[in-house]
Image (cartoon, helix red, strand yellow):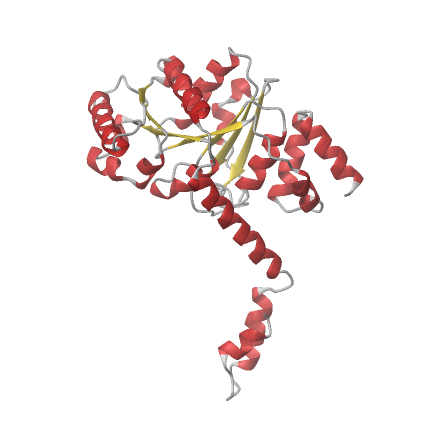
Amino acid sequence: MRNDIKILYQQVREGNFRAIARAITIVENELDGHEDLLLQLAENRHARIVGITGPPGAGKSTLVNALLTHWLKENKKIAVIAVDPSSPFNYGALLGDRIRMSEYYTHPNIFIRSLATRGALGGLNSRIIEITDVVKEAPFDIVLVETVGVGQSEVEIAGLADCTVVTLVPEAGDEVQTLKAGIMEIANIFVVNKADRDGAEGLYRNLRILAHERANGGAETPVVKTIATEQKGLQELAAEITAYLAAQNAVPEKRVHLLAEKCWQLVQAQRMKGISMADIREGIADAISRPDFNLYAFTRRYL
């Protein structure tokens, strides 16, 4: 293992924010040394991942801000990974969270990192598993992952997070359609944010009914009303998150599925090293005019 990577890894373990940021950059962009760094990571069961998801306009960033305010009073050390839409010009994050969370950006107990989706489905970054593993190596109590808010395709967060909070607002649209949305199936906790607005009570009641139907005799999914801008309902929400995390005693099936998918991707990437689409295209362009061209025989040369 390279000495500079070994030093960087130790600094991450010590909670050096600059080192954590550097390690994320190396892993996200697959820079030289990223494999050595990932191979050093241990399973840190102290830091827990809390996912904040929901449709655009649900107030996810405001809710994250409010949770930070609450947890700082309890002297917790928190990392925030905010996945923003990609810039159409350079594929970098649009850095919306840095504006929304500006009051915490230099706080010694809070680390904030923007990530771009870079076209990845699921509302997350394609390297999110590796990035969260790096962040968990540092001495944080909680790692908050806020998704970009793309709707039903955000189910990937359910496999990544130890607790998934689905945030909705009365203005989210047709209530019936909202209750049928795919992201409703991944919630460990429902939040009705902006609960002082018209329609909030109706949405709250419908979510309670849905939670009761989903429970099928077991524990019901909690539904919490919040007004994040006023810190209302945050103590109850934080208590529900803590209770859910404390009750977990097994690895969720969704996590196993997500990690198996990631392993499959890593194996594919390793097997595909040295093979480029440009080379394949050029080879086919040369071979396709031959009378004996066969795509499947052509493919065998790469296997």
Q: Position of residue 126 (x, y in %)?
A: 52, 45
Q: Position of residue 250 (x, y in %)?
A: 46, 33
Report if residue 50 is visible in the image: yes
From the viewer's perspective, is 218 left or right of 129? left
From the viewer's perspective, is 188 left or right of 107? left
Q: Quadrant of the C terminus?
A: bottom right
From the viewer's perspective, is 159 left or right of 12? left
Which residue lies at the image location 54% right of the left edge and 40% below the top edge?
129
* Between 151 and 165, the one nearer to me in the picture: 165
Which residue lies at the image location 53% right of the left edge and 40% below the top edge?
128
Q: Position of residue 293 (x, y in %)?
A: 51, 83
Among the 4 quarters of the image, the one containing residue 247:
top left
Q: Residue furthest bottom?
A: 291
Which residue lies at the image location 49% right of the left edge and 18% below the top edge?
68
Report if residue 123 is visible in the image: no
Q: Quadrant of the N terminus?
A: top right
* Between 166 and 26, the one nearer to me in the picture: 166
- Number of numbered tags placed on the structure image: 0
Among the 4 quarters of the image, the one containing residue 298:
bottom right
Q: Position of residue 187 (x, y in %)?
A: 35, 32
* Between 226 and 247, the one nearer to me in the picture: 247
Which residue lies at the image location 44% right of the left edge and 35% below the top edge?
147
